[in-house]
Amino acid sequence: MLTSQLDSQRPSRVSAVTVVTQQPSVVTLTRGETASIDCNLGSVSDMMAFWYKQIPGGLPQFVLFFHHYFTDVTYGSGFSSPHFTSTCNSVSDCRLIINNVEEGDSAHFCFSALSDGGTV
């Protein structure tokens, strides 16, 4: 089972309230299927997207970094394409895609973004 859960972090600078939504909050799949986890940052734009994987009781692992202006995705150690990838449909909507899910993918996946306004 693959589980996704939104982890919120306090912004380093706040000029307005930012509501981050992640859909769906829980994803349950069988081996070989494709998982898609969407995050919407509301009014935050021009951000850099960071995805992390955390197994309960463990430390977060950096999965990937993506900026909607760039075509390249930067991966953390042990993570690669085509198994993990990310897209941004606009400047505030990002998606983590996990292709051909495996048992080892069962974890909390956390999203963080960095923009001119700080960290979300």
Image: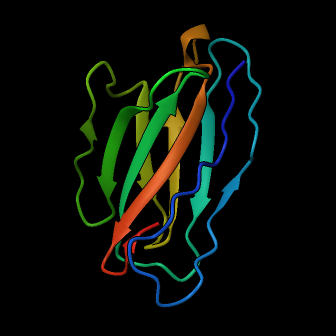
Q: Quadrant of residue 25?
A: top right
Q: Report the number of numbered marks.
A: 0
- State whether residue 30 is above or below residue 71: above
Residue at 52% x, 58% y: name it.
9
Q: Residue at x 26, y 23 (%)?
A: 77
Which quarter of the rendered picture does the N terminus lie within? top right
The correct choice, above or below, for 56 with respect to 11 in the image is: above
* x, y percent for residue 20: 62, 66
Residue lying furthest bottom? 15
Residue occupying the point 67% across, 41% down: 5
Q: Nearer the viewer, residue 46 or 33?
A: 46
Q: Position of residue 66 (x, y in %)?
A: 32, 52
Q: How is the image coloured?
A: rainbow
> At 74% from the left edge and 34% from the top edge, which residue is drawn?
27
Left or right of residue 70, residue 53 in this image: right
> Which image quadrant is residue 49 in?
bottom left
Q: Position of residue 115 (x, y in %)?
A: 34, 73
Please provide percent x and percent y for residue 55. 56, 22
